[in-house]
Image (spheres, rainbow, N blue to C red):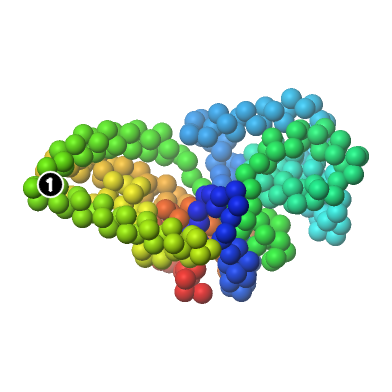
């Protein structure tokens, strides 16, 4: 289980090669990431990213490039051909398009990454083909600071794995957003009552802020040393993210007026999503016959997913910092 940052900056200092080599030494036979499967995407009427995704699909369709008669067969056959002939860039463009329009965004993004690496060497014919098949460069693949561009996809290349498993869940997202908004509003109101530093509750809150600042400073120092990913996979990283993302979580329970019920409701929805992500990973990996799986998710998911995997019969969990 590997927790990551979603952004390593435009000029990353993270030591990605060391990280990738360490994970590759685990010898995984499958890789899973924080993407929705096509089936899960289609089953959700709305979630935080639905409109943006629909806009991308509409953009691809607006190019009016001919679709394969049998998309599933086309994808399967093109993958097989690219394994033998990886420099057939126009075939890869068509594959990326077919995957995207099938709503298999995880694997479409991987193919777009491969094209992004090859693009500087494209000739005029390939440049024209890219625009005809996928549109303006960077319209579908422009984020080169995230964990997929810098860690996950290079790892897949190193392992010769060309399929990325999707394990995310967004079916609780609207309920999660409502619970989060309610908790946030009440927390902000409660926070204003903590301005009197003579009160014991205010001192308790101040101590938590001081602790979070110390952890944040350590995270920044790790980042400057090229070791941010290692830090967010540590107990201190878990503690920092839990404090700053969940209003202290349960650490402030018992203080006067603290919105405990609303924080609990918010945490329950977070638990629901992560339970789904654990179950999706295990069920899909077992169905695929995978035995050694590396799972990537935003670092805030790391601890709760590790706990979920450990509670799952037949699953042995390895953490990045213990490899």
Alpha-carbon neighbours of circle 1 within 10 Å: few (<14), some, or many (≥20)?
A: few
The image shows residue 161 at horizontal and vertical percentages of 70, 61
Can you see residue 308?
A: no
The image shows residue 28 at horizontal and vertical percentages of 61, 68
Q: Nearer the viewer, residue 274 or 199?
A: 199
Q: Which of 94 and 3 is in front in this view?
A: 3
Task: Describe residue 14's horizontal placement relative to residue 269 as left or right.
Answer: right
Task: Describe residue 108's horizontal placement relative to residue 188 as left or right.
Answer: right
Decide: is 163 above or below 53. Answer: below
Decide: is 202 above or below 223. Answer: above
Name the residue: 39% across, 62% down: 218
Name the residue: 47% across, 41% down: 170
Q: For mark 1, give the secondary structure.
A: loop
Total number of numbered discs in the rendering: 1
Name the residue: 67% across, 46% down: 109
Find residue 60 and report its image quarter.
Answer: top right
The image shows residue 245 at horizontal and vertical percentages of 35, 47
Name the residue: 49% across, 30% down: 46
| Residue occupied by mark 1 | 197
The image shows residue 274 at horizontal and vertical percentages of 42, 51
Can you see residue 12?
A: yes
Find residue 266 and report its image quarter.
Answer: top left
């Amino acid at each position: 289980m590997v927790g990551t940052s979603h952004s390593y900056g435009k000029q990353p200092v993270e030591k990605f090669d060391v990280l990738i080599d360490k994970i590759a030494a685990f010898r995984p036979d499958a890789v899973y990431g924080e993407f929705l499967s096509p089936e899960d995407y289609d089953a959700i009427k709305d979630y935080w990213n639905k409109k943006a995704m629909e806009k991308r699909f509409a953009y691809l369709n607006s190019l009016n490039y001919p679709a394969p008669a049998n998309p599933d067969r086309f994808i399967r056959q093109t993958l097989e051909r690219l394994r033998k002939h990886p420099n057939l860039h126009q075939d890869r463009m068509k594959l990326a398009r077919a995957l995207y329009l099938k709503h298999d965004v995880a694997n479409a993004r991987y193919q777009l990454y491969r094209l992004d690496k090859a693009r500087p060497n494209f000739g005029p014919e390939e440049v024209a083909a890219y625009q005809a098949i996928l549109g303006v460069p960077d319209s579908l693949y422009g984020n080169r600071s995230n964990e997929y561009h810098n860690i996950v996809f290079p790892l897949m290349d190193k392992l010769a794995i060309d399929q990325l498993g999707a394990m995310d869940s967004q079916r609780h997202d609207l309920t999660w957003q409502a619970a989060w908004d309610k908790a946030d509003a009440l927390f902000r109101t409660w926070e204003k009552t903590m301005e009197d530093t003579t009160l014991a509750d205010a001192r308790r809150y101040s101590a938590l802020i001081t602790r979070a600042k110390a952890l944040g400073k350590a995270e920044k120092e790790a980042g400057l040393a090229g070791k941010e990913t290692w830090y967010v996979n540590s107990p201190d990283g878990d503690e920092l993210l839990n404090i700053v993302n969940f209003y202290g979580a349960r650490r402030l329970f018992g203080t006067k007026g603290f919105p405990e019920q609303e924080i609990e409701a918010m945490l329950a929805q977070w638990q629901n999503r992560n339970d789904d992500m654990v179950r999706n990973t295990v069920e899909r990996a077992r169905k695929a016959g995978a035995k050694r799986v590396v799972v990537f998710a935003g670092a805030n998911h790391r601890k709760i997913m590790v706990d979920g995997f450990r509670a799952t019969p037949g699953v042995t969990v390895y953490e990045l910092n213990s490899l």
